Amino acid sequence: MMAKLKFAWALFALTTIAGLIAYQMVEPGAQIPIHWNIKGEADDWASPLFAFFMLPGVQLISLLLMSALPVLEPRKDNIGKSTKAVQAIVFGTLAVLAAAQSAIIAAGFGYEPMGPKTIIAAVGILFVVIGNYMTKLKSNFFIGIRTPWTLSSDTVWKKTHRLGAKLFMASGAVIFIGSFLIEAPYLAGLVLGTVLPVTLFIIFYSWHIWRQEKSGRTIN
């Protein structure tokens, strides 16, 4: 799996190199903004070492975990059949972290941070990517819509992911477009108001389909 994630590893390397360059260039003792409130104002700071290498560290942990999936995943054949989807989702996740890294580096050198709007737009794109590949995921315990009902039935898994794919892509489009139209203080509400209802509905839907299957009713 590690070799199949080569583009994700390359993105991790670029993010880390950017952090190294920033660390060498920033003034010693500087405090770097690492978090912004809903108004787009920095409200937490850290040392350059933590600020510039925190997100590459998260990327590395994610990559190591994904690379170990063939060993950790009980349904190994299904993970093998889901390789392209896993590659795309992992790369998309790392790209969002890279966007956040860019925002932190820019803020560390006094530039107007890309901050909330850029990060939220990246999250929207990630949702579209996940939705686009969701139907290509086979049943597994690590990636996808993992409820007790989807994991207990391949039919429920497929049906839930077919609907989930459409809802994730629609949610991603709403979040992406909204990130440019809505002021920073309302971005958290945009994401929460979009993602929470979709998540709850998908969970309910997986249970509903499972109930249909259990009762012997036809599932299209």
Image (cartoon, grey):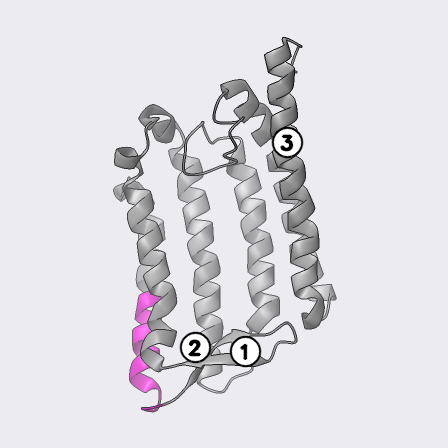
Q: Is residue 26 magenta?
A: yes
Q: Considering only order in the chain, which callout, 3 or 1, is on the residue closer to the N terminus?
A: 1
Characterize the local packing of mark 3: few (<14), some (14-19) or many (20 or more) Cα atoms within 10 angstroms. some
- Return the mark for residue 113: 1
Work out which quarter of the rendered image holds the C terminus and state it.
top right
Residues at marks 1 and 3, CA–CA distance in whole angstroms: 36 Å
The reply, left or right, for residue 64 in relation to residue 207 is left
Highlighted magenta segment, given as a residue range: 15-29
Residue on which disc 2 sits: 105
Q: Residue 155 at x, y = what percent?
A: 54, 19
Which element is circle 1 on? Answer: loop
Number of marks present in the image shown: 3
Mark closest to the chain's N terminus, 3 or 2: 2
Residue pointed to by mark 3: 163
Residue depth check, mark 1 versus mark 3: number of the one nearer the observer = 3
Packing grade of label 1 (10 A; few <14, some 14-19, many >=20) is many
